[in-house]
Image: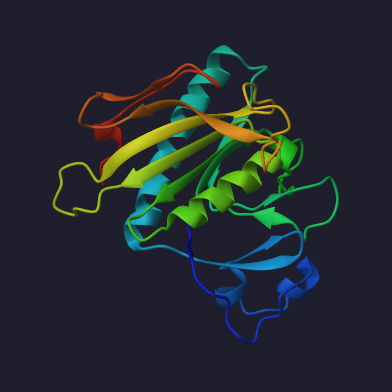
Amino acid sequence: MSVWRPKPPNLPEVMTWEELEQLPDEIAGEIELWEGRVVWAQRGPAEHQDYSAQLRNALHRRARQLIATRPDQCWQVSTGTNIFFGRTGKSDFVTPDFLIYRCLPDRYQDIRGDDVLLVGEVLSPINCHGDREAKMAKYAAGGIQWYWEVDLSPEPSRVHGIEMVRAYGLASELDGLPEGVHPLHPANYVLINEWSPKNAPGIHIELPFLIDISWQELEL
């Protein structure tokens, strides 16, 4: 996940995609637009980028294996790619660390929220809880079915740089709340599984498709 900072004082509170495109790349590349509101999302440390790439590569191999046996199931995997919400317009988007999305009919198409199967965020020790909750709520509101979090170890000398991986599934209806009580967000993520090098040989889950990744495959 990006390291969120207060936005530079010379940026407006609200922008369009067209206005964002006029900014220098080094500034525009660290901004997300949430329904036009400027969210300053500065990139994380080198380890953040490296583990995002490792997760992308491992998931890409699993997606290729699926396509080999199920050609009707075509998925692509990428990192640091914008997801635009709504069928038109580009002024409401987020940029996950890695994502799985359906194969699109044409090259260089924008990826829309309903094209996306899974999004993931790599959390370095400097990420705060509020950032995480806000980003999760944004993905859930966009209807993305699967959300993964990857916690990096705060101890750089550890053999495994990844401390924990968590998989969440989208739940649009929450039962059991007291009468008259309603959730702040109508769709929320529910923890499905979690894996740590301390107690699991790797990541193993059968949804949204079979994913089996050893920790060694993710080492830098």
In the rendered image, the vertical position of residue 139 relative to residue 14, given as above or below: above
User: Where's residue 102, x and y in %?
Assistant: 67, 32
User: Where's residue 133, x and y in %?
Assistant: 53, 49
> Which quadrant would residue 73 be assigned to in this image?
top right
Quick check: can you spot residue 96?
A: no
Left or right of residue 2: residue 106: right
Work out whether residue 176 or residue 125 is closer to the camera in this orientation and state it. 176
Label total for image: 0
| Residue found at the very far bottom of the displayed protein | 10
Name the residue rendered at 63%, 17% in the picture. 71
In the rendered image, the vertical position of residue 179 relative to residue 93, given as above or below: above
> Which quadrant would residue 204 be assigned to in this image?
top left
User: Where's residue 217, x and y in %?
Assistant: 29, 34
| Residue found at the very far front of the displayed protein | 179
Name the residue rendered at 56%, 68% in the picture. 30
In the rendered image, the vertical position of residue 150 relative to residue 216, given as above or below: below
| Residue found at the very far top of the displayed protein | 69
Q: Report the colour scheme.
A: rainbow
Name the residue rendered at 76%, 41% in the picture. 106
User: Where's residue 181, x and y in %?
Assistant: 69, 34
Left or right of residue 122: residue 75: right
Left or right of residue 8: residue 56: left
Name the residue rendered at 15%, 43% in the picture. 159
Work out whether residue 175 or residue 37 is closer to the camera in this orientation and state it. 175
Quick check: can you spot residue 81?
A: yes
Left or right of residue 97: residue 188: right
Work out whether residue 120 or residue 79 is closer to the camera in this orientation and state it. 120
